[in-house]
Image: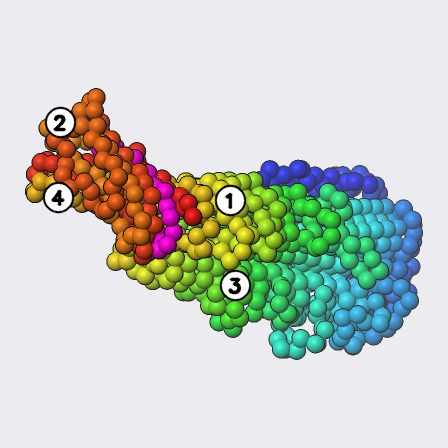
Amino acid sequence: MRLLHIVINHLTPFGTEYFNMPTKEEIQGMVGAPLERNAKSLATGDGTTDDAAALNTLFNTATERNIVFGKGTYKVNTQVITTTAGARLRITCDPNAKILTNSAFAVATNGIIRIENAAYLEIDGLNFEGNAATTALSKSPTSNANYGIYILNCDVVKIVNCSFTNIVRAALRIEGCDDVWIDRNYVPGTLNYAFDIWSCNRVICTRNIVSGNGLAQSPNALTDDIGQTPGIMFVQCTKVICAMNQITNFRNTATKADGCTTVLYLKNTVSEFGKDGIKVMSYNPSAGVVGNPIGSRCIIAQNTIENFRGWESDGAANINVFECEDVQVVNNTINGGQTMLNSPYENGIFIVNGTGTLVTKRVIVDGNIISACGGPAIQMARVSNTSIRKNKITNYMTRLTASYLGGINIDNSSHLEILDNILFNETAPVQDAMGIRTTICTNVRIKRNKVQLYDYHGIYVQVKQGTSEYLDISDNTINEGENTPMVITGDTVMGTVRVCNIDGNTIINDTLGGDLVEFNMNFITFNLLTMRNHSSIALTSATNALRMHRTGTGGVDKMDMTGFNWAGTATPPLFTYRPTEVFNGVMGRVVLPANVTNNNGTANTIADVTGLSFPVKAGVKYYFRFQIFYTAAATTTGSRWSINGPGITTLHYRSDYTLTTVSRTPNESLTGYNLPAASNATSGTTGSNDAVIEGIIQPSADGTLIARFASEVASSAIVALAGISFVEYKIIT
């Protein structure tokens, strides 16, 4: 029987899911004209007489039957059971009818009411009161009679509009059924499960209201195992839809799917839970089978999850996915409810694979709103083909313990993109919290993110050993941090990045300490490293715009630097490095970021070409070549071009620049700064002239080597042109 017609399509990045429920006509046509029996034809319903024998007779009379419970209380002190194969059973109830068991009886089989092997089962409007008041409270009671209703090996099951109170083990245990629909039921204050669903083919669980009593327990009594099962549990089912439910007040996980092939959690409201809000994971009983089925996938979309209470230990999450091949977590709203500095540790979204062979084929985390988490807002490990985009994250990492984790924290993963996310803290997080952190990852893109008010690093990337085709950190904005905004570092074993782009990032910071961008090149080789159009605004205490260093093996084969800009009361040097071997043989390039004019009122007054420079270290030999294009106010205005820098041990250079359209002014064998002393007399044209300064320098002190120029005529402008004027340099030690 497949009357529920559950359809879960392969999903677009935003998800497309739908399912059709059976119509009233379909149900009536399938059931036919059953024998209708009023429960009071045999049972008393007086609340004191044991009606179990009468109900057993009713449940086992004819294969097609409609049992109607009229107003009254039907007490059962022993199990009610039917095992008739192929039966079609409908149970409907008056709103004032109730089945009651208040004895701590024990039976050899599970369930106070047990129904097996039916072709069709519908229970509508049943009010069931269990025996929690007289049964010892335990996570694993010796008598599983504490299940309310146990349904086994039926074709179609429909449980609607029922209420279950005073339940110890589970209101519903459903196992081995084909199509299951659990809709609009009410389970308040259960001590363990509300619904426990095992090995069913297709399950729809919708519009139920369930709650545990987890918060009634002491939050510090972590050894107390009362109430530690999930509220709604699915185990080894083929397709599961859990939608529009309200799940609250469970000391452990609110809802969990173990070992299911396809799972959809949609538009649920989950609150006041002690460990995980929504959890999808591999099935791993002590006996054995490990891992979700091949092809397993889950979609967790448009849920509201709030107020994690943290009765359990570390490692909890509002959304927790373990070992699933295709994962989509989209458009959820998560409020961890953590405002204290010593708040419990929990992740917003946690997606991880174990150390086995399972490979995640796709992970999409898109459009979620995540706030007030004690730990990272998004935490992943051992995943691949992952897209984290357009999430809004506020007030993360509120826990007091130092952890060096990020609002987005990804470990040991590959083919990762982190795009267009906003990470914002209203107040600075404690204990070294980062914005975006990836460690031991390959092929990473971090683009167009905004990170504000972090405690350690805005963006931190650790490159994995082996080869990455690319690392792209571009167009991000990092604001108001307390340490180096951007750090790129290596693993403990050599890794290679073929192309690394650090382009178009902006750092805005009033209290920055340390460097803007730091490369710790231990065990990393970059075949091509480009750093372009990097801006820093309102700096007060930055040490370096860029710092490169290492203590082990690593370096750069080819580097391109263009358009580093900064402004503020502290203007850091462009970059420093140590040791010098990091740059041996590597050509660096700086392009003039803005036009520079010399129209001094005194002729032949030399001045810096501001922005056309590079840092030098004492005792290191450099080759350099300045290529400068310039305009002149008139062809009768000449110029001179030279360099300036720190103290020198060795300096040998030459220069030449335009004199006419067919000749140049050469200056050879120059060994001092600001030479030659005089300008030439003309320029070739007003709009297109060029100068070249080329040589070798070994400074005796740290400093900056910068191009200089003068106009031969007072107040007649010579203009060095931005964007096409540049300097190239490399260490030749």
- Mark 1 and mark 2 in contact (Cβ < 8 Å)? no
Residue 444: horizontal and vertical position, in percent?
54, 45
Give the residue type at disc 4: Thr
Q: Is residue 95 magenta?
A: no
Q: Which residue is mark 4?
A: 605
Q: Which mark is residue 526?
A: 1
Q: Nearer the viewer, mark 4 or mark 3?
A: 4
Residue at the far top: name it: 662
Q: Which residue is mark 2?
A: 635
Q: CA distance from mark 3 to mark 1?
A: 26 Å
- Looking at the picture, tell me which residue is in the foreground, 671 or 257: 671
Location of residue 613 by image quarter: top left
- Mark 2 and mark 3 in contact (Cβ < 8 Å)? no
Location of residue 636 by image quarter: top left
Q: Which mark is residue 15?
A: none
Q: CA distance from mark 2 to mark 1?
A: 46 Å
Q: Which residue is drawn at the image coordinates 72% and 48% (left, top)? A: 358
Q: Nearer the viewer, mark 3 or mark 1?
A: 1
Label 2: state its secondary structure. Answer: loop
Q: In the displayed structure, does residue 20 sit left or right of residue 507?
A: right
Q: Which residue is drawn at the image coordinates 62% and 75% (left, top)? A: 219
Location of residue 107 by image quarter: bottom right
Q: Which residue is mark 3?
A: 404
Give the residue type at disc 3: Tyr
> Dot 3, crowdedness within 10 Å: few (<14), some or many (≥20)?
some
Which is more N-terminal, label 1 or label 3? 3
- Looking at the picture, tell me which residue is in the foreground, 419 or 302: 419
- Mark 1 and mark 4 in contact (Cβ < 8 Å)? no
